[in-house]
Image (cartoon, helix red, strand yellow):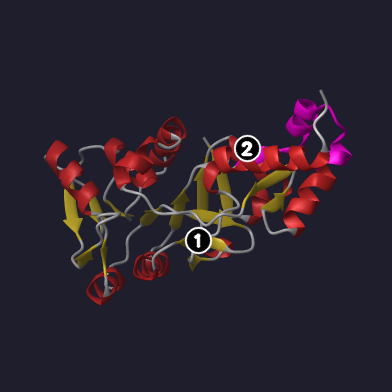
Amino acid sequence: MPVHSGGRRLLIEQALCEFGQVNLKELAQRFKVSDETIRRDLEILSDQGKVKRVYGGAVSVQKVPESQLAERMKINGEEKRKIARLALSHIPEGAFTVFLDSGSSTAYFAELLPDRADLLLVTNSAAIATAVAARTRRLKVHLIGGTVRESTLATVGALTVQAVRSLHPDLTFLGSNGFDPLDGYTTPDIEEAAVKRAMVQCSRRAVVLADAGKYGHTSTVQFAAPDEIEMLISDQRLAKIAGKDLKKLAKDVFLA
């Protein structure tokens, strides 16, 4: 039985709440209507401020809430593992300093770091520092001090920013609560954004690790514009979701 336009748009909203994104052609097949009909539905929802149009579909406009690190580790876990493995390939042999900020994607990456005496890990994540130090003997771990945030176990504040700015790592890996070509890379907390921004500014190369589910979401504070990020490493879904905007997200984009 055909679904009327109002009911169809309500179902589209429900799909966005559940999955965070929808594909135009898949919706057309689901509701047995033309692509143009779904395009009009998405335009109406966009005009109402309920969705954000992207190439080939739409994404939710809801602000990305923060959750406990353990909970976030479970979301898109397989994609984050693939991203972490690809990110690891950018760590060369020889003496090297790596910055990691706090987040689920960077936590997966930290699990893969090799136990090398010539590798220095600097992080503001109490969780990452503890986990890496517990499983390695030769790798050097430096935890940056500051005030610990309960939700992310990240150190923040003026002392943290000052310490970050005194260092110049070879490579910085950051997570992001949301990203898109216009709003760049964003996070909910002002203090955590200040630390992330300092990491971007003092690093020789800044890399964001973010699964495609974060695309199109904008959180409270921007910590980097797309042209400030040397490399974005995401999963294969991003090519379909971002479409022509893919190359606008960073200087280089790699999909795991």
Residue 162, how many percent across, how many down? Answer: 26, 75
Is residue 239 shown in magenta? no
Label 2 neighbour load within 10 Å: few <14, some 14-19, many 20+: some
Is residue 24 shown in magenta? yes
Residue drawn at x 82%, y 36% is 4
Residue drawn at x 43%, y 30% is 78
Residue drawn at x 75%, y 38% is 7
Any part of residue 143 in sight: yes
Quadrant of the snapshot with the N terminus = top right
Secondary structure under badge 2? helix
Secondary structure under badge 1? loop
Between the residue at mark 2 and the residue at mark 1, the CA separation in whole angstroms equals: 21 Å
Q: Is residue 3 left or right of residue 242?
A: right
Q: Which residues are magenta?
A: 21-38
Q: Nearer the viewer, residue 220 or 125?
A: 220
Q: How many marks?
A: 2
Any part of residue 91 in sight: no
Residue 66, how many percent across, how many down? Answer: 39, 54
Residue drawn at x 29%, y 55% is 151
State whether residue 20 is above or below residue 206: above
Residue 166, how many percent across, how many down? Answer: 27, 73
State whether residue 43 is above or below residue 239: below
Label 1 neighbour load within 10 Å: few <14, some 14-19, many 20+: many
Which residue has dot 2 on it? 15
In the drawing, what numbered circle is on residue 173? none
Which residue has dot 1 on it? 219
- Tag nearer the camera, 2 or 1: 2
